Amino acid sequence: MTLLIREKIKSLSSSEEFMLFLKHKRGLAGLIILSFMLFIALTADFIAPKKFDEVDPSSRLLPPSTTNVFGTDHLGRDVFSRIVYGARIALWVGLLVVLIEAGIGVPLGLIAGYYGGSIDKLISAITDMLWAFPPIILALAIVTILGPGLTNVVVAVSIVSWAPYTRIVRAKTQSIISREFITAARAVGESSLSIMFRYVLPNTLASVIVLATLTIPSAILYTTALSFLGFGAQPPTPDWGAMLNEGKDYIFKAPWCSVFPGLFITLTALSFNLLGDALRDVLDPKLRLG
Amino acid sequence: MGLLTYVAKKLLIGIPVIFGVTIILFYIMYMLPGDPIKLLLAGERVTPAKIEELRRAWGLDQPIYIQYFYWLSHVIRGDLGVSIVTKEQVSSLISQRLPYTMMLMLISTLLSYSIGVTTGLLTALKRGTLVDSVISVAGVASYSIPGFWFGLMLMLVFGYYLKLLPISGYEGLHSLILPALSLALPSSAYVMRLTRAEMIEVLNEDYIRTAWAKGLNKKRVLLVHALRNAMIPVVVMFFLDVPWLIGGAVVIETLFALPGMGRLLYVSIIRQDYAVVQGIVLIITVLTVVFNTLGDIVVAVLDPRVRIEKGGGS
Amino acid sequence: MHLNKAISKFTVIVLISVVIIALLATYFTLMPAPTPTPTSPAATTPQLKRTLVIAIPEEPMGLDVQQVTWSNEVHDLIFQPLVVLGPDMNIVPDLALSWEVSEDGTVITFHIPEGAKFSNGDPLTAEAIKESIERYKSISPYAEDFADVAEIIVLDTYTLKLILSRPAPYLWAVLVTNYGGAVNAKVAREVGDDAFNRLPVGSGPYKVKEWVRGSHVTLIRNDNYRTNMPFVNNKGPNPYIDEIVIRFIPEDLTRITELEAGRVDIVRGVPLEEVRRLRENPNIQLYETLSPGIHYIMVNVKKEPLDDIRVRQAIMTALNRSEIAAILDNNVVPWFSFLSPSQICYNESVERLAENLYEHDLNKARELLRQAGWVDTDGDGIVDKNGIPLKMTLLSPTDDPALKKSAPLIQAQLRKIGIHVEIKEYTYDYIRELTSEWNFELALRRFSWADPDILIYLVHSEYGNYTYSNPEVDELLEMGRSVSDMTERTKVYSRVQEILLKDLPLIPLFVLKEYTAVNKNVKGLIVLPPYGTLIINDAWVEQR
């Protein structure tokens, strides 16, 4: 399996597609922004002048200056430090979302597409059912039962949204299994599981990656919206969505408290979207509906 | 298979989906610790005995399947139950607030298409130029901005500083413009992308060039073709996304103080007002299934292959 | 191909028409009429605006004050109690003309003015009030308020006698609020409680015209309104304000923006950060009342490690309340005892005592923890005992801005003495439910009630529904319910507080200053302490 992936990556990097990608200006921009976010997330401990939970009531709501590049918030915490540590959280959210959504959606899609018939109908029905479920309800339920916290909220949001993954993987699987090499493999006596893993899955990876980069920003934004409603990161976690929510109360007095988190959220979501667009144009132009 | 059979099949699948959602929801609400009575009264100057009495009066001490059956038997007769919190008929509560959310959604859909299709056409025609890049990036940016942030900016700029539109509340249709824009702008970007992609493909098709060569009106050809192709999948997607849009609607309705159903849903969830939540989710699910089916019908009409292969989703 | 084109064209047209038809249909059939715009057309006096617009954060659950669990401005305007608390916190007449209390405090006789009427014209007699109180006792969740009223006797048409099983000074706290408002029980019987909850009949200065759910309540002047409040000039209906629209605007920012744009005349629930800015705004008048209650940390005294009094004392001493006040822009008063100056039986010396006992002292706090066996053995900044670090969770309400903002600061302050605090945010109601089930360690809460009797619902072993139990406190609280003499009563509650200061089942934080922001074109408004009740009698609104 890993051998196959490695081969695929090698073939990709030398291929036309990679060249095309580099030429895609917007995709490149997205990649650069994302790398920047990754960079500050990784080096947070070094570049942050203060700890993100260091309160200092005597220096609250200070405008940006040389000591506090992005100013301070209503508790006197350094906004820049919080933004920088917040990058870790934002990327963590993205990763978690993909892990859960793809982790559930892809296998289900594979099974549904491969076996067809009543299994397919069952999986499709369950998928549709969960997609029709307003995530805001599940988010509150999980928060109430398991306790509040960003991770729980993200889990809640991801659990109801694996549907796109299932649908795409299912459609791809259906088209792949009709091809000759699959029939050949079956004739030789390969097990279904092996076929799915060795042949079908790698061919769906491209679509999955594209979908991932396009669903992460909506997950980030939805989580931000839930922060506005009161579910999300608990203090003192420097989650950008929570910062945006806390900061909006001070929009007339100290706009920097909300402008910077808002800016970074937008940039991160933007970078994923641009990246996703580029990847889609390069890898799978037919994937328009997402 | 015939169109009618196809429709029937799709609707039939929809029914268990609706049931499934309500059952899952019931179970979730049942699992929530506490209940609306306790939420309202616990810790106030009320005795625990009184709280128990009220719980029993509302049937909250019954096992879950009995409560569900009770609810179901009433729903079939058209009775959605009563709100524990306000003692009002759920159906009356919903019918008072649903119109606002529906108007909001419909207006934002209209705005979304107008903006999306026009910009899509524009960027397709001016493909590769600076205009294209700028508008495309602006489009991507607009669905990268947090919803309430955007709404807040609109409110401050147009409502407060420029005093062009109402800041909050419902004073007539114009009150829905800013809220609808907050919702419409992000989704218009999707419409724009789709229109642009379809347009570019269409522009390359042979018969179009032949038509132009023959001197037929370029604009008319574009309009008919692009509109046709781009709109349908997006309409389908829009209604498929209804459960997700409710979250956005809650935020926008709270921000702009609109008496819509989204806000009612949120408040009812917080208060564990089961009947109201069930009623609203039921309606949302039914709408989703109906429009989903409508969308599938349209796709099937346009592409007969779909009917034959599977009951394929969009 | 041609058929497809035709069908698809047709489909497109159908779809577009469906959307447009849906829009039009919804608009014309289902949409109710829009809210009246704030600037209504001029009436007889062109300089006056005859509609007053008030913005409040939360929509009431019902308009019948006897069926709700919390009441607000809407109920204040619809219902009229027998008596009210005047500007100097004395009990003065409102509906009632006068009253007498017997020597032993068990008989209260009210005299009602002749010809008093409900807003719908029904006579407001002693009989009507008796029915109203009986209805309260039967359906209100707070029926217990009238538990000590053994009998209600109608002496004659306009004289009512309440016979109490024992003296109940706390009863007055209910009678002066809208909960004590006279309700037309006859109408309630006729239309049913549910309908009455949407269109109640009271005797307040205004009556309900319509309630648009989720949006606003429109009230119109009650021409049958008469009052005996001594501190207002106009004892009848207000001739200058025909209509009052109370809008529900949940988002703080939106409320304030509407006020500053001049589209709303009065705002309740002024967000704390905006106070200073509004104070400096020449177009806005700010009214301040000191909350009749405290904001505090509720402690689960049965749960380790909080069962050790020294730990509780350490927390009490470690908190830097002036810092908390600074975070809240000094719109709160740091507080150490259990009653606020706006409450009855407030005793300043108790607050002084508390301040001295628990003056902010980090070293003292650390020493207390050390004595209790908590030391930092592994140098991680958190104290521990037997290998277990000192950790606790703090429940913080998402919908109470003052408490929500204090939580991270409290977390940081307790960190300084080595306590690791984890914050869990829930809605206030849910926290209240959790605490009533003893499912918590520390919880941020508040109360707001003019009478000190409220304490019985917090710290009494039986009524309190709570883990703390001290028989001496129980006895004192029960005594406090029936002592009529103010000095004696104050002594009782002072003693209660002294014991509470030793046991610390609650850790006081601050007293909140509550603000009402009013546009300067509203004149003659009275904002009554301690709840900030709006008295409209002498008010008028000038056009901008």
Image (spheres, grey):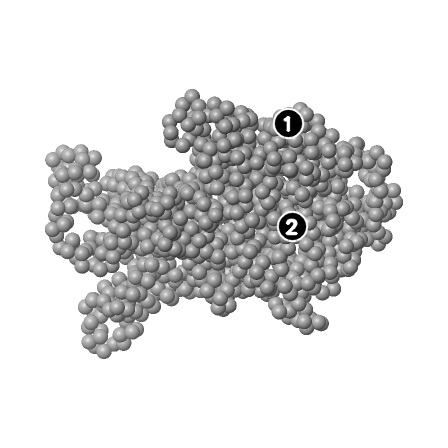
Instruction: Kindly state the secondary structure of the residue where label 2 is placed.
Output: strand
Q: Quadrant of the C terminus of chain C?
A: bottom right
Instruction: Say if residue C36 shows up in the picture.
Output: no
Q: Position of residue B43 (x, y in %)?
A: 60, 35
Tag 1 secondary structure: loop
* Image location (x, y in percent) of residue C320: 52, 40
In the displayed structure image, the side of residue C83 where residue B39 appears, left or right: left
Q: Which mark is residue C461?
A: 1
Q: Residue furthest right?
A: C156
The numbered dot on residue C146 is: none
Q: Residue furthest top?
A: C386
Viewer-proximal residue among C380 and C197: C380
Give the quadrant of the N terminus of chain C: bottom left
On the image, the x and y values in percent for residue B20 come to 42, 41
- Residue A4 seen anywhere in this rendered image of the structure: yes
Instruction: Verify CB contact (< 8 Å) between mark 2 and mark 1.
Output: no
Asked if A290 appears above or below B56 in the picture, the reply is below
Q: In terms of image quadrants, where is residue C172?
A: top right
Q: Toward the viewer: A198 or C386?
A: C386
Q: Chain of mark 1?
A: C
Return the residue at label 2: C289
Q: What residue is at 15 percent from the left and 56 percent from the top?
A: A19
Task: Answer few, some or many: residues within 10 Å of disc 1's Cα (few below 14, many 20 plus, some between 14 and 19).
Answer: some
